[in-house]
Amino acid sequence: MKKFFIAVLSVALFAACNGGTDPKAVDAQKADEAAKAQAAAQAAAAAAAQAAAAPQVSPEEQMATDKGLIDQYVAQKGLKCKNTSSGIYYVIEKEGKGTSPTENSTVKVHYSGTLLDGTEFDSSYSRNKPAEFPLNGVIKGWQEAIPLLKPGGKGKFIIPSSLAYGPRAMKCQNSR
């Protein structure tokens, strides 16, 4: 069976900005985001080509597979999760204060992204610098999960493949 990219994200939200930022800083940030978006688009195109060559699984079958893998992960880790109607499992580890970000907010977060087997695929912690980005420019799972936090809050989000990085086959064992 093909393994899909289920993301486990540990996130600390520092700030959610809805405007009032320095235009020069915004322009520099947009240029940086455009370069990152271009690199991500190239990686996504390569992954899509790889996924197209592999046997296809229906979205319903993948949702059921993801749910089973996530349920197993949650049970093994002893997590007391809540879940959204779309299938994101989450634990709010620290409540923040203030207003939650919206889809149109720019957020500043520190995060670590891993597969279910613990393999880290991205981390702002390893770069020693929080990431700042417009929430409407990232994966659907982040768009739904980050607004569950308030500034200063911290949480763990387990995002199914359909809301994360889609049908990118993984070479590691993510079903442990």
Image (spheres, grey):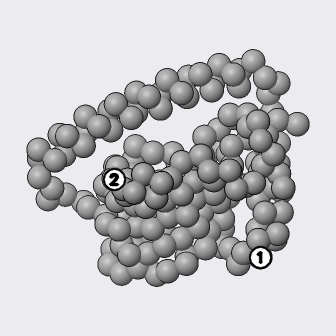
**From mark 1 to mark 2, how far is it between C-alphas?**
31 Å
x 54%, y 27%: residue: 43
Q: Is mark 2 on a helix, strand or loop?
A: strand
The residue shown at (39%, 57%) is: 128
Q: In this view, does 84 lie to the left or right of 64?
A: left
Q: Is residue 14 visible?
A: yes
Q: Which residue is drawn at 19% across and 40% down?
A: 28
Residue 145: give x, y in percent of width and height.
Answer: 52, 61
Q: How crowded is mark 1: few (under 14 residues within 10 Å), some or many (20 or more)?
A: few
Amino acid on which disc 1 is placed: Gly
Q: Mark 1 points at which residue?
A: 78
| Mark 2 residue type | Glu
- Up the image or down, 111 lies above or below 82; here it is above
Image quadrant in which you'd find residue 89: bottom right
Q: In which quadrant of the rendered image does the C terminus lie?
A: bottom right
- Mark 2 highlights which residue? 132
